[in-house]
Image (cartoon, rainbow, N blue to C red):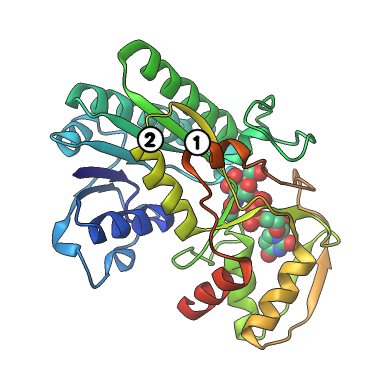
Amino acid sequence: MRYVVTGGAGFIGSHLAEALADEGHSVVIVDDFSTGKTENLRWAEGLDRVTVCEGSITDLPLLREACAGADGVFHEAAIASVPKSVADPVGSNAVNVDGTLNVLVAARDAGVRKVVLASSAANYGDNPNLPLKETEEPRPQSPYAAQKMMGEFYARLFSDLYGLETTCLRYFNVYGPRQDPSSPYSGVISIFINRIAAGVPITVYGDGTQTRDFIYVGDVVRANIRAMASHYCGVLNVAGGEETSLNKLAKVIMECTGNVCDIRYDAPREGDIHRSLADTGKLEVTIGRVAECSLADGLSQTIEWS
Ligand code: UD2
């Protein structure tokens, strides 16, 4: 098969491209390298089956070229930052909404069977009805969340209007190798691992009782590949289905690294959600259980990479 992976040089996209190439598929990566990295594309196996189209998803002709002859598209490219979307709603909208619409148009016109799109748990906002089911009311609290919701609306429309199969995967807190720890808004796991390994104190915003539903990047790849194989059109949560507090997370990372460091408690981050937990029932019924990697194993693999 021939697959397009937008954002294929990024954290999740590069793992997905690697897994597809490893399975013997040919892969076309579309990435503008704004946050994607060439280091993410240095694997041992299957690189000869990968083509890189350097450019943005705001470039419709480029997407048309990439989608020619493709069987499926995995749409991972985005400006995947809540704070960036707050600072520049117009700029992030151009990529996250207009770019997504371009991907759907290019896929439709190329006769692609299916598009699997990266969506986000951000869409639920501070909805307190845990565990969160896909049927819960979306409560976007940032331009980023509103943009991801718009992507879901367009995906649904393209299925209904044009018969293009689409599945939107609402990622919860994804972690693993290749996640960049360098920004203050990077995923908490990459930041904690980096600091604990260096023996530098970590900062917990709030009292550390806030929880997140973490999922290892390899399990997210599995969800994408299974969603592509299915004919299901709609929205699915992609999460481990377990709540882990920040205090517990810090403790487990210290155990895994064998390093102990100070924890500093600071004021909670503005707009922080206290608890997050997905209901993964629909995911399991639709494409089977995907969360196979335990937090301890996923952390060990991430620590090994870092
Ligand atoms: C995640 C997504 C974000 C959006 C949001 C929707 C990531 C990286 N971000 O944000 O894109 O989808 O969910 O709700 O997946 N924290 C610390 N110390 C640190 C860094 C973080 O205590 O040094 C806390 C932070 O205040 C929060 C928790 O750790 O309570 C998780 O933070 P995060 O930035 O990894 O992810 P989150 O859930 O805010």
Query: Residue tagged by mark 2?
Result: 230
Look at the picture and state if 86 lies above or below 189.
above
Q: Residue at x 64, y 71 (%)?
A: 192
Look at the picture and state if 291 lies above or below 293.
above
Q: From the top left corner, tell me how far across and down residue 219 is, in percent.
A: 48, 56
Answer with the quarter of the image where residue 16 lies: bottom left
Query: Residue tagged by mark 1?
Result: 286
Q: Tell me the quarter of the image containing the N terminus.
A: top left
Left or right? Give the position of 131 relative to 45.
Answer: right
- In front: 244, or 247? 244
Answer with the quarter of the image where residue 278 lies: top right
Q: Report the number of discs.
A: 2
| Mark 2 Cα shell of 10 Å, populated few (<14), some (14-19), many (≥20) | few
> Circles 2 and 1: CB distance less than 8 Å?
yes
- In front: 85, or 192? 192
Q: Secondary structure at mark 1?
A: helix
Q: Residue at x 56, y 62 (%)?
A: 183
Q: Secondary structure at mark 2?
A: loop
Q: Residue at x 52, y 30 (%)?
A: 235
Look at the picture and state if 202 lies above or below 185.
below
Q: From the top left corner, tell me how far across and down residue 297 is, in percent.
A: 56, 72
Q: From the top left corner, tell me how far across and down residue 104 is, in percent.
A: 32, 26
Q: Residue at x 55, y 76 (%)?
A: 300
The answer for how far apart the CA atoms under marks 2 and 1 are is 8 Å
Answer with the quarter of the image where residue 263 lies: bottom right
Q: Is there any visible trace of residue 88 in the rendered image?
A: no
Q: Is mark 2 within 8 Å of ligand 1?
A: no
